[in-house]
Amino acid sequence: MEGRLITGLDIGTTKVCAVIVKEDTDGVMNVVGVGSAPSYGIRKGVVVNIDKTVQAIQQAMEEAQRMAGVEVDGVFVGIAGDHIRSLNSKGIVGVSRDDREITEEDVERAINAAKALALPIDREIIHVIPQEFIVDNQDGIHDPVGMSGVRLEVEVHIVTAAVTSAQNIVRSVQRAGYNVQEIVLEPLASSLAVLDEDERNLGVVLVDLGGGTTDIAMFFDGHIRNTSVVALGGQHVTNDIAIGLRTPPEQAEEIKVQYGTVLRDQVEDGEQILVPGVGGRPSRMLHRTTLVDIIAPRMEEILSLAYQKMKKSDILELMAAGAVITGGGALLPGTVEMAERIWGLPVKLGVPREMGGLSNSIQNPIYSTAVGLCLYGAEYHEGGYFSELRSGNLWDDVFESLKRFFKRFF
């Protein structure tokens, strides 16, 4: 397919980002369109107003398509939110062939055995990601197909989501006029944009500080080992500023972006900022340290809760490469330094990898998920576009299409 177009759509709590990438026949990735729009129909990663979500999707997509000079039909969509849950599971099967050669059918049976869990009726599996295979007690195997054995085991990482939350995301995209090609967990998509192979092998924590939630993914030996969610994000910081300074939320966001920091030593003595009033009340001057005193406690809470999630995984000591922070919340000055102090790990700011075309337009942590969705589509989505997900068989389609993602971690 010459000049294949791939679109990533990040539907966030505070913004909707769309990135269109053109993959040349020689595999070169060129950014050709970028669009964004304020998001008012999402709360903590969950659709609470479909009409407003549809409008934001249309606005972001129209902007990206206008920049690219193309029209797209399908998009890769990220999913996140505090409804996301994950766990590790194991599947065990006997090798079916008489000659004891392990086939893809045996691998699929083992994976199906691992995901045969008793889930509540309102939850469904969206990712089943193999971590390693074990053949006759020999562990550490990445691809057992073709090997000989009697007993095949697989250890997998399973991610589940609320059925209605995922279906509402799909419906919003479809009502905006686009097909959903695949649904991908947002921290997994972001990892493709900001992590390299060495980090995944050594052990690294990816923390995506979004508007409504903070998503965490832990990698070791090239595999995803743990995912978790903190139901707090950058929007909570903005709300604290709006209440603490008695200013409208829109003005609070501008103040946060222009003057916000989490470190007092980054503020000059006596420095003041102009704070607009509410409902026609006059603006007033306040010390910038007052703003820091509002931001710092909330950011410390978010990072501390993230650290608690990391510790529950029991693999924190394996994170030799440290941590990578991405997402819009990571742009607050001092966030990296505060994270290093709280987590006791080396931390760096994660920005999307450089590509061709309008690559400079996406060199910002807010585009990590959208860029990662494009990279997923380019590398692990066979044959370009999938047909539109059928509402009656949504999760069967999602599972079948996402099985290609397994190879990414082998």
Image (cartoon, rainbow, N blue to C red):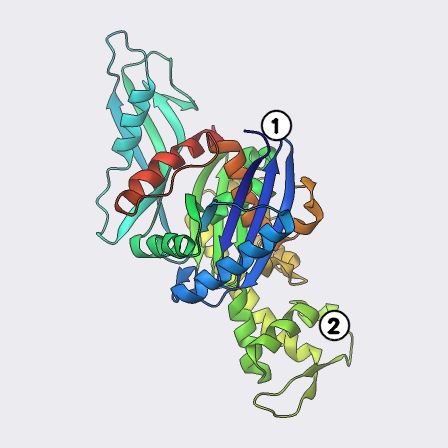
Name the residue nearer the viewer: 282 or 128.
Answer: 282
User: Where is 158 relative to 251, above or below?
Assistant: above
Q: Secondary structure at mark 2?
A: loop
Q: Residue at x 66, y 70 (%)?
A: 260
Please identify the quarter of the rendering in which residue 96 is found: top left
Q: Is residue 59 visible?
A: yes
Q: Is residue 401 or residue 73 the one in the foreground?
A: 73
Point out residue 24 in the picture as x, y percentages from the top left corner: 62, 31
Measured in 3D between alpha carbons, the distance from the residue under mark 1 to the one under mark 2, in whole angstroms, is 50 Å
- Disc with the residue nearer the chain's start (1 vs 2): 1
As drawn, is 20 to the left or to the right of 53? right
> Vertically, is 30 above or below 79?
above
Toward the bottom, the furthest residue is 281
- Residue at position x 38%, y 17% from top? 145
For this orientation, the residue located farthest to the top is 99
Judging by the rendered image, the residue that carries numbered circle 2 is: 267
In x, y percent, where is residue 368?
Answer: 58, 49
Q: Tags 1 and 2 in contact by the CB under 8 Å rule?
A: no
Q: Amino acid at mark 2?
A: Val
Please tell me how crowded label 2 is: few (under 14), some (14-19), or many (20+) other residues with Cα within 10 Å: some
The answer to which image quadrant residue 268 occupies is bottom right
When asked about the image quadrant of residue 249, the answer is bottom right
In this figure, which residue is indicated by the disc labeled 1? 25
Q: Is residue 332 above or below residue 395?
A: below
Q: Which mark is residue 211?
A: none
Report whether residue 348 is seen.
Answer: no
Residue 250 image point, x, y percent? 58, 75
The quarter of the picture where the N terminus appears is: top right
Q: Nearer the viewer, residue 29 or 54?
A: 54
The location of residue 401, given as percent across then percent down, is: 38, 35
* Residue drawn at the location 50% of the way across and 65% of the way down: 39
- What SS does tag 1 mark? loop
